[in-house]
Amino acid sequence: KLSKRLETVASFVPTGAIVADIGSDHAYLPCYLVHQNIVNKAVAGEVVKGPYESALRQVKLEGLEDKVIVRLADGLQAIEDNDQVDTITIAGMGGPLIVSILEKNPEALTSVTRLILQPNIHAKVIREWALRNEWAILDEVILEEDEKIYEVLVLQRGKMKLNEQQIILGPHLVAQKSNTFMKKWTREIDNWKRVLQSIEQAEQTPEIVQKKKELVHLIS
Ligand code: SAM
């Protein structure tokens, strides 16, 4: 059974799409999409040998060799022109890694109309990338599974306007303010409060007070 996280990603793949799942690991997502008759053809890309071999094994095990093509390649280089890929999924990595994959081979996005991205952390950089490259956020989901909180961003081509708060929190997520959303940002605020507190306490130690005096003396 697919994780709730990947099921959420799958739920945004349009019926009949041609999908490339980049960083596919076991290729669970493309195999699921074919089994569910959501797609008829998919590419599973992996840059690391071990996961690439697990993908090959899984696709064979499920008897999907003619529908899920597994390729050993860096990022979007797994996509070939005649694949006619129109939808890309990238899940289970940090936002900055997802963005670096998108930026490395922008030409691979020419025929792509939908991106479904699931950053484990730093979704903000994906929203910034989308703004810069004229992708608009069609939908967003925040979900919790096994004590971890994940975000899923669905992008389509188009311009959008986001303010600072929406870039950080997500325009749809901040409008909904779900329990999971509140939990994530309450946790985040608590963490920053702890950091601030420890900085303030550190400032009170005699060594730091002494260092500060020395510095003041030096620059005065
Ligand atoms: N997408 C799956 C999921 O969400 O469950 C697997 C996530 S796994 C944590 C991240 C995978 O991305 C790893 O198997 C890693 O080898 C792969 N990966 C990292 N950088 C990549 C790149 N530049 N191109 C292709 N795959 C990459």
Image (tube, rainbow, N blue to C red):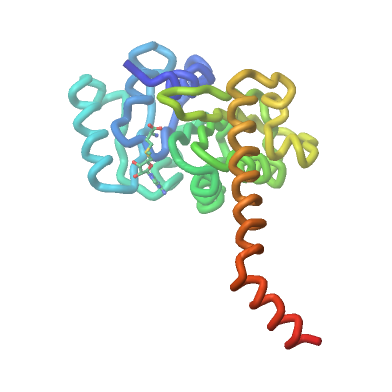
Which residue reaches farthest top?
Answer: 36
Q: Nearer the viewer, residue 156 or 220?
A: 220
- Residue at point 61%, 70% (across, down): 206
Above or below: residue 213 compared with residue 176: below
Q: Does 41 sit left or right of 53 as displayed?
A: right
Where's residue 93, x and y in %?
Answer: 45, 41
Where's residue 193, x and y in %?
Answer: 65, 44
Picture quarter with ligand 1: top left
- Residue at point 37%, 32% (across, down): 43
Q: Does 219 sit left or right of 73 as displayed?
A: right
Quadrant occupied by the C terminus = bottom right
- Residue at point 70%, 47% (across, down): 132
Q: Nearer the viewer, residue 127 or 169?
A: 169
Above or below: residue 99 compared with residue 185: below
Which residue reaches farthest front?
Answer: 206
Where's residue 205, x and y in %?
Answer: 61, 65
Q: Nearer the viewer, residue 197 or 31?
A: 197
- Residue at point 51%, 33% (across, down): 118
Where's residue 208, x and y in %?
Answer: 63, 71
Quadrant occupied by the N terminus = top left
Q: Report the number of numbered marks.
A: 0
